[in-house]
Image (tube, rainbow, N blue to C red):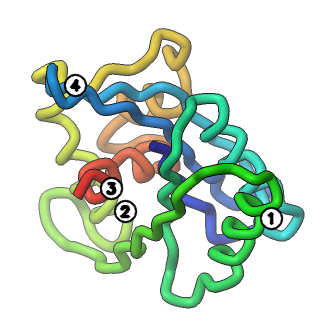
Amino acid sequence: FVIVDPARTANDEGCPTGMLAFAVDAHDHKIWVRDEINDRLSIIDGSLSRQAVDLCKRTNSQILLVEVDGGDDFIKREFMEEVARRGQNIQLLWIEAKKKSVEGDYGTGLEGRKRRDAQGLLRWYKSKQIIHEHKLKDGPLEKQQLDFPFPNGFDSLDCASHLFRAMD
């Protein structure tokens, strides 16, 4: 499956969109991070939905999960139209954005929440249950993990933190 955490701004200085492709091996209890995209993409010009469907095709994923905010009917429609236009057999699922900010050991506000959510992945990595494809070495997700708890951005890391919500 593929998870998309779209950036909420469509300008050149905005945050990049994070997209990650996963594969789950239920027999061996492993989760593979197969591919990633971390780029400034626009829903307006269609590059966001195009890239997401391309990633699904490249990784043979039939489920596409997209983080949405309450009023994201436009984003939902763009993804549905792109999947239909390309005749792909991809199931679209929507993940509600977590808006709740936190206070505590992880900091305050939304960045604190993102740090707390990303910390939840740590035990899975330590037990070697989440494995990255070799081609992702030195990529945005790995760099954000190595710079944790204060990465230069949370785009891929925040996308990865949706993993367990996606598997529910």
The kind of secondary structure element at disc 4 is strand
In the rendered image, residue 72, in percent from the top left (x then y), is placed at 60, 82
Q: Quadrant of the C terminus?
A: bottom left
Q: Point out the tag, 4 or 3, that comes first from the N-terminus.
A: 4
Q: Residues within 10 Å of mark 3 (few under 14, many from 20)?
A: some
Q: Point out the tag, 1 or 2, that comes first from the N-terminus.
A: 1
Q: What's the residue at 33%, 55% (across, down)? A: 166
In the rendered image, residue 155, in percent from the top left (x then y), is placed at 52, 49
| Among the 4 quarters of the image, the one containing residue 23 | top left
Q: Which mark is residue 166?
A: 3
Q: Residues within 10 Å of mark 4 (few under 14, many from 20)?
A: some
Q: What residue type is labelled 4?
A: Lys
Q: What residue type is labelled 2?
A: Glu
Disc 3 to disc 1, how far (Cα)?
28 Å
Q: Residues within 10 Å of mark 1 (few under 14, many from 20)?
A: few
Q: What residue type is labelled 3?
A: Ala
Q: How crowded is mark 2: few (under 14 residues within 10 Å), some or many (20 or more)?
A: some
Q: Residue 100 carries which label?
A: none
The kind of secondary structure element at disc 3 is helix
| Residue occupying the far bottom of the picture | 71
Residue 153 in view (yes/no): no
Asked if 139 appears above or below 153 in the picture, the reply is: above
Q: State the residue position of label 4.
A: 30
Q: State the residue position of label 1.
A: 11
Q: What's the residue at 39%, 20% (across, down)? A: 132
| Among the 4 quarters of the image, the one containing residue 6 | bottom right
In the rendered image, residue 127, in percent from the top left (x then y), is placed at 11, 22
Q: State the residue position of label 2.
A: 111
